Amino acid sequence: MNSENISKKILHWYDNNKRFLPWRKKVYKKQREYFTLVSEFMLQQTQVKTVIPYFINFIDKIPNLNSLAKVNDNQLMRCWEGLGYYSRARNLKKTAINILKDYKGKLPNTIDKLKSLPGIGDYTSRAIMAIVFNKKIIPLDGNVERILKRVFYLKKEKEITKEYLTSKKYFFGTSNRSSDYAQAIMEIGALVCKPVNPLCLKCPISENCISFRKKDFEIKTKNKFNKIKYFEAKIYEKNNKYLLIKNDKFNFLKNMPIFPMQEVKEKKYKFSNNKKINIKLSNMDMKIILNKIDKFPNLTNKILLEKDNSQSKILPSFTKKIFRSIHKI
Ligand code: SF4
């Protein structure tokens, strides 16, 4: 496989097919760092099309690292409302503060330093290194993993080694457009090398793809089977007011307003006659009993919410979903 040709084909495809995404807008270097930081945090666990309007609004309201470091938490959450995984927003602000304090307002340019910042893990640090600093690095997300596995016909689960992601031998050739290159691979994964029915006839590297030659596109992915857990949510309601608490108990939706709830045994869930709903989180399928109670308990960290405001307040979609369900009770 000639890496020079592959990289040319990939970059040519990217120049002609890349989507216009607001964080890809041509901006000066400092702004590029900020756009990449914000977009990469938003894109953790969330699809591009969902992120676009949030990113535009966020940049409008919080246009740079300084304003992010100083933003008040309510405004920050308002900008993130509905995007989910709210710890990302809190970590993003902490990261901005750290960058200003420890790196004079510039993103650090090593993987280790980036990973020491709150909310930046392996993938995000690699994406920043490639996109912002034009390093010959490919961030490994689900899309990129799929392309590599198909191109090289890797059938075992953990066959992608660092060599595939950093070695010039396979992909990069002599191109100095590493930033575009990493984004091009991600873009081909998102638009062409789809999980089911890949669009090989539109793919710039079909000639170099072993799966295409063999007409075998099946790949082994990690078993993403989510754990099922059972909960009971207590819906305290009086005069159209609902009681929420700040979540300091569960690892999901930390510090966000939720209905008071507790984990219960499967048996209790099965035999309950109350209304039940299912909510999927990234690592868990939650089966929740909604238990309506009309007497308010004495709690210290309670938040009272009017029924009419249940969709407009700064609430995680998790809590809004429960609200919508109880209004149908
Ligand atoms: S040829 Fe098909 S299977 Fe191979 S990388 Fe391209 S889209 Fe994916």
Image (cartoon, rainbow, N blue to C red):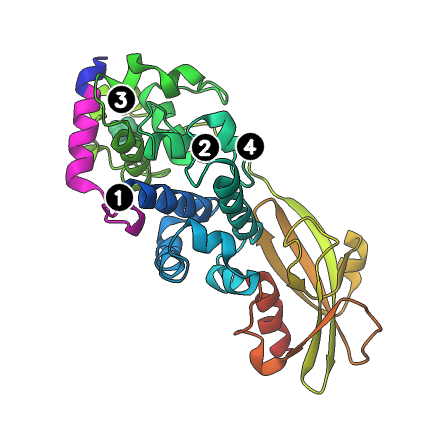
Residue type of the residue flagged with mark 2: Ser
Residue 16 position, x and y percent, is 15, 39
Location of residue 8 with respect to 77 vertically, above or below: above
Marked residue nearer the N-terminal end (1 or 3): 1
- Can you tell which quarter of the image residue 173 is in? top left
* Residue ID at (39%, 47%): 39
Compared across the picture, whether 122 is left or right of 181 comes to: right
* Residue ID at (34%, 58%): 56
Label 4, ligand 1: CB separation under 8 Å: no
Q: Can residue 309 be found in the magenta stretch? A: no
Residue type of the residue flagged with mark 3: Cys
Marked residue nearer the N-terminal end (2 or 1): 1
> Which residue does the numbered mark 2 point to in the structure image?
125
The image's mark for residue 209 is 3
| Whether residue 204 can be seen here | no
Element at label 1: loop
Marks 1,3: beta carbons within 8 A: no
Between marks 3 and 4, how big is the CA–CA gap? 37 Å
Marks 1,4: beta carbons within 8 A: no
Residue 129 position, x and y percent, is 38, 30
Q: Which quarter of the image is occupied by the N terminus?
A: top left
Residue type of the residue flagged with mark 4: Ser
Q: In which of the image's four quarters is ligand 1 placed?
A: top left
Marked residue nearer the N-terminal end (4 or 2): 4
